[in-house]
Image (cartoon, rainbow, N blue to C red):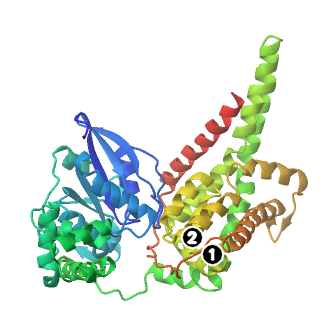
Amino acid sequence: MQDTQKKQILLVGNPNVGKSTVFNALCNKKQKTGNYAGVTVASHSGNYTYKNEEVEVIDLPGSYSVYPSSEDEAIFSKFLIDEKENYAGVVYILEALSLKRGLLLFQQIQDLGIPMILVVNQIDQAERRGISIDISKFSEALGIKIIQTNAKENIGIDDIKEAVLNNQFVKTQTTSFEIPAEHKDFIQKLASHKGFDNEYKAWMSLSLGTNLKKIESVMELINEPDSKSLVPKRLQVQETVRRYQSVDKILSDVISKKPQFKELLTERLDKILVHKFWGYVVFLVILLIIFQSVFFLAEYPMNWIDSFFSWLTAFTSEHLPDGPINSLISNGIVPGIGGIVVFAPQIGILLYFLYLLEDSGYMARVVFLMDRILRPFGLNGKSIVPLVSGTACAIPAVISTRNIENVKERLLTILVTPFMTCSARLPVYSIIIGLIISDGTFLGIKYKALVLMGMYLLGFLVALFSASILKRFIKNKGKTYLVMDLPTYKKPLFGYDFKMVLGKVWDFITGAGKIIF
């Protein structure tokens, strides 16, 4: 049962609508965010206190439907339905630029009888593109109050807290989905026999295909002549088509769009960034800039840190009494900590660039670009996200593979991700490169930066080589296709990403520091 001292709410929505950003704003946390689908691949929880009420917030993985097509969506569906008695309600996040797509899942949850608060995020982005949303009409059409937010600017967050405090969760008594006439009699019988309190729950149990043998036995029990012809996937498609027809009617009355006479920035950039030739050139140039920055920008703070710890070593050696304590501190602890902290600038710069790429929406383009390269090795474009994330840390990178629908491709990605150079190896590479490679440049790029980039590319090539071997032993059923939404480009919040990097760098320092102590 739900803890009477702490209210529990769920954050739910499609991938890449700003759920994690809302979560961070509510709970003052630093959960990773990014402008591409699949950032959240496991549920995260946090707490906040508002007007003396403590609330636990659970951020579930993004999903497009209650019918899961990947591991992260399965986590979402299972938690949403199985834990229904343990949470007060759902805070559903809609993105202003993708209302049609988001309303499908909203209606499904609404029809399950789950109480909800509706939040429309990033309305400013819609306004910039000439899209006007009549919030009052929209609210009336859905039968629920709408809260407008811009989570990255912390706008509307207190309104969410106030709504949760006052239990403004709305539970509808009627369903928006009308059961097809040809199945209505059977669904009514199934709902009555299984004890469902509305017909949609019976429809969903049938469409999910879970416990299919039990359902088929019920079909036989209630003498349904056409029970064998009810195919779960076909029912899901039928529901999706009908729901989108309903959503189109709602949105036609609440959305107005000014005609666009000039090409959008996103469209202009994509002509280059996803081009079959120039897209790869730009990607390599970006990598070169990152690795050049790792050495060039980090050089000065690394020298300052090294000088400080050299001074601190000499200071402790001179001012502490001679003996084992002096030796331990001046020759052990201080140089040991300095040897860790000195690499923090390089790790921080690498992570900062990765966060900026994710935040801007460019990483989604990299997924699209890399799909044609990775497919011959048994992977797909979505595998590049765990592989790139593996340059920071392999553990969260492996977890992020839940976003890959195909089991074989997911398993292969998990097996080869550890070959990528993670941030823990960066100090080792930096020392070796610093000792062996000279300080010269080639076309204005440091030799050290080129060698470091080569080390990372070598890890990537080894990962591909390993995948090409492993795919022969892991059987795949059927051909898969990459279908994904390319988000609009957004200006990264540089300060927000900097705070995220500081947290990660601190985790590195404290994690490595434990070895010393």
**Vertical relation: 459 (above or below) 216:** above
**Vertical relation: 82 (above or below) 453:** above
- The reply, left or right, for residue 158 in relation to residue 153 is left
In terms of depth relative to the viewer, which is nearer, 279 or 12?
A: 12
Residue 449 on image: x %, y %: 78, 61
Question: Element under label 2?
Answer: helix
Residue where numbered disc 1 is placed = 378
Q: What's the residue type where badge 2 is placed?
A: Lys
In terms of depth relative to the viewer, which is nearer, 306 or 273?
A: 273
Quadrant of the image containing the N terminus: top left
Residue 133 on image: x %, y %: 22, 73
Q: What's the residue type where badge 1 is placed?
A: Gly
- The reply, left or right, for residue 486 in relation to residue 54 is right
Residue where numbered disc 2 is placed = 408
In terms of depth relative to the viewer, which is nearer, 263 or 71?
A: 71
Which residue shows up at 67% across the image and 51% down it? 423
